Amino acid sequence: MLKLLKDKAFLKRFFSIAFPVMLQQMITFFVSFIDNLMVSGLTNEAVSAVYSVNQLTFFMFVVSSGVVAGAGIFVQQFYGSKDHKHLVQSHRFKLLASMLYLLIILPIAFYFGHYVIEFYSRNNDNPAEILRLALEYMPVILLGFIPYVFTASYSTSLRETGRTMEPMLASLVAFFINIVFNYLLIYVFELGVFGAAIATTLARICELLALLYMCQRTKFLHLKDVFTNFRVEGYLVKTISRKSLPLLGNEILWAGGMVMISMAY
């Protein structure tokens, strides 16, 4: 361990990879947190509405990382062995798994989301107003989850191959767009929580577009490479699935536990 700390080349490489990842994770958290902060200038009910919806999306965000985690193991392995063909197929598995996840989770969230909101607002003085505002905010935020899961697929694949700057820069784009449009839509155009939802969803879309643009520029995981002959070999699907299910189960249990704790308090 001490030898590694004296290895300047190792430390330089370590921090060049680790720092952008840490910064991106922090920015991603703030993109979701900004809505809570910006609507605080409206009413207490608006803050409660946004908070309750964000508990639902928190669960969805955490589980989405479990959806792509298993394939990430293979992205790293194939990158190390310079097997670009199967690296791309592992990335395709992430995209397919993300699409399947969206097909399952979005209808559930749209149908059962109001029950979560009602539970969070049960002891508030004005639960009906919280529910009304939350139902304005929730549909647009849930639509913004669509670009987010594909952003997560690309971001993780890039990080797993040592490319950490691109995801960080894309998150910075989302961060600044979210701040600017949150202010404009909430306070200038007076759209309230609905404006906050539009701003966050717009930020998520721009983040994905920025990431795809950088992939095109660097010629790594660019659209032609990923979507030409879009297939994943059967044995790879089975192998990745076996690794993915325990990771997915772990994320579901952890995220579910955190939401339950939040509900209890």
Image: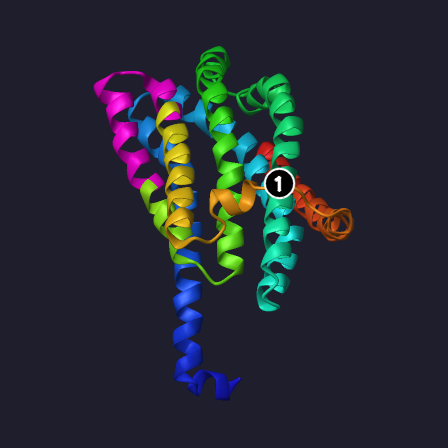
Q: Which residues are magenta?
A: 174-197
Which residue is found at the position 55% from the left and 45% from the top? 226
Q: Position of residue 188 (x, y in %)?
A: 21, 20
Query: Few, some or many C-alpha atoms within 10 Å of disc 1 (few <14, some 14-19, many ≥20)?
Result: few
**Left or right, 55 with reference to 205:** right
Q: Whole-percent x and y of residue 211?
A: 41, 45
Residue 69 in sight from this viewpoint: no
Looking at the picture, tell me which residue is in the foreground, 73 or 140.
73
Task: State the residue at coordinates (71%, 49%).
Answer: 244
In this picture, residue 142 sits left or right of residue 107: left
On the question of residue 38 being in view, the answer is: yes
Image quadrant in which you'd find residue 200: top left
Q: Is 137 placed above or below 129 here? A: below
Q: Main secondary structure of the magenta part?
A: helix
Q: Which residue is mark 1?
A: 230
Of 54 and 151, nearer the camera is: 151
Q: Identify residue type, mark 1.
A: Phe
In the displayed orientation, state which residue is furthest to the front: 229
Query: Helix, strand, or loop for circle 1?
Result: loop
